[in-house]
């Protein structure tokens, strides 16, 4: 499958680009970025061609992988779908529900395949754990904590990210937490009723009520000192307690599985569980949480 990469930032160069360049079933056709100089640098690093015109790249591709801020990503995803390109997007697909809905509608109208890269859903052993707990059922409560040191003193390439500075952990790592809880505990049918509160820095706490009556809590932060950082999730029910295992592979390997998932969805016509419809739901829930912070 001929892929175009949209984006030239740290995440594109560390994860999307290397995974695409190394994948046996991918031809990395080219790279486009909002800055031509950065696109040329990325193309040189990845052994491909830089494009100044995004529409020219879309014309030359079967699929695109987008590694751009969410509110830049969403309109480009619509544009790519209308050009006939399958979509491998990043989370969150957008920070505005209407923008997410427009992506979903474009996919439905054009019939292209879509996969959104929620890292834990494509990493092992976390992906297998999520599937196992969803199949087991009977869970009554859960929690998911993503405590990052990006703004807490870590030496991170994402510390200077303008959109992360503006929107905070709720939008950057909130999708990860929901990608674990929603498949296991069910949808949040009335997101307008969820509760949210602020902690130190950009820390946000959420309380969710799920479709079958289960409840969950999330703590999301980029403001933890490095010594306090960590990712944890668990569910509790009649079978006892089950805890999310630690990831033991790189995001590049996980992204390669997302490429496989998109290829399979395009081949079979079957929607993937992490498609744009799921990503739209995540955006809707997080938008409700953001609204709750201002009530």
Image: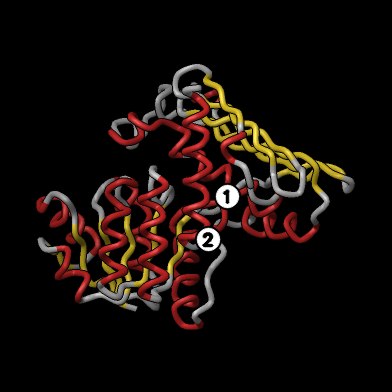
Q: CA distance from mark 2 to mark 1?
A: 9 Å
Q: Nearer the viewer, residue 250 or 100?
A: 100
Residue 104 point in image, percent of width and height: 42, 61
The single residue placed furthest to the top in the displayed view is: 200
Q: Secondary structure at mark 1?
A: helix
Crowding at mark 2 (Cα within 10 Å: few <14, some 14-19, many 20+): some
Residue density around tag 1, few if under 14, some if 14–19, many if 20 or more, within 10 Å: many
Q: Which residue is mark 2?
A: 274
**Residue under the point 80% across and 58% down:** 136
Tell me where residue 210 sits by quadrant: top right
Contact between labelled residues 1 and 2, with CB atoms less than 8 Å apart: yes
Query: Residue drawn at (38%, 32%), measured in percent from left and top?
Result: 167
Residue located 18% across and 69% down the image? 57
Of callouts 2 and 1, the N-terminal one:
1
Q: Residue at x 35, y 66 (%)?
A: 106
Residue 235, disc: none
51 over 231 or under it: above or below? below
- Tell me residue 72's x, y (percent): 27, 49
Display coloring: secondary structure
Name the residue that disc number 1 marks: 179
């Amino acid at each position: 499958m001929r892929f175009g990469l949209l984006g030239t930032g740290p995440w594109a160069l560390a994860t999307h680009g290397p995974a695409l360049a190394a994948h046996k079933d991918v031809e990395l056709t080219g790279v486009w970025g909002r800055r031509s100089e950065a696109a040329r640098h990325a193309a040189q690093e990845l052994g491909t061609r830089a494009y100044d015109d995004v529409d020219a790249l879309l014309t030359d591709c079967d699929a695109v992988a987008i590694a751009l801020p969410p509110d830049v990503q969403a309109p480009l995803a619509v544009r790519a779908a209308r050009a006939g390109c399958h979509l491998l997007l990043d989370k969150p697909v957008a920070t505005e529900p209407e923008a997410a809905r427009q992506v979903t509608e474009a996919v439905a109208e054009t019939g292209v395949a879509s996969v959104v890269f929620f890292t834990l859903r494509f990493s092992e052993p976390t992906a297998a754990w999520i599937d196992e707990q969803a199949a087991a059922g009977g869970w009554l409560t859960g929690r998911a904590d993503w405590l990052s040191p990006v703004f807490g003193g870590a030496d991170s390439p994402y510390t200077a990210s303008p959109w992360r500075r503006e929107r905070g952990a709720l939008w950057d790592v909130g999708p990860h937490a929901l990608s674990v809880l929603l498949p296991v505990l069910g949808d949040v049918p009335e997101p307008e009723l969820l509760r949210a509160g602020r902690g130190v820095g950009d820390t946000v706490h959420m309380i969710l009520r799920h479709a079958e009556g289960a409840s969950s809590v999330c703590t999301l932060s980029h403001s933890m000192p490095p010594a306090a950082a960590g990712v944890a999730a668990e569910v509790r029910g009649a079978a006892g307690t089950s805890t999310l295992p630690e990831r033991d592979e790189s995001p590049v390997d996980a992204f390669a599985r997302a490429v496989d998932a998109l290829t399979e969805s395009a081949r079979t016509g079957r929607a993937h569980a992490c498609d744009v419809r799921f990503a739209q739901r995540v955006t809707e829930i997080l938008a409700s949480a953001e609204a709750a912070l201002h009530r």
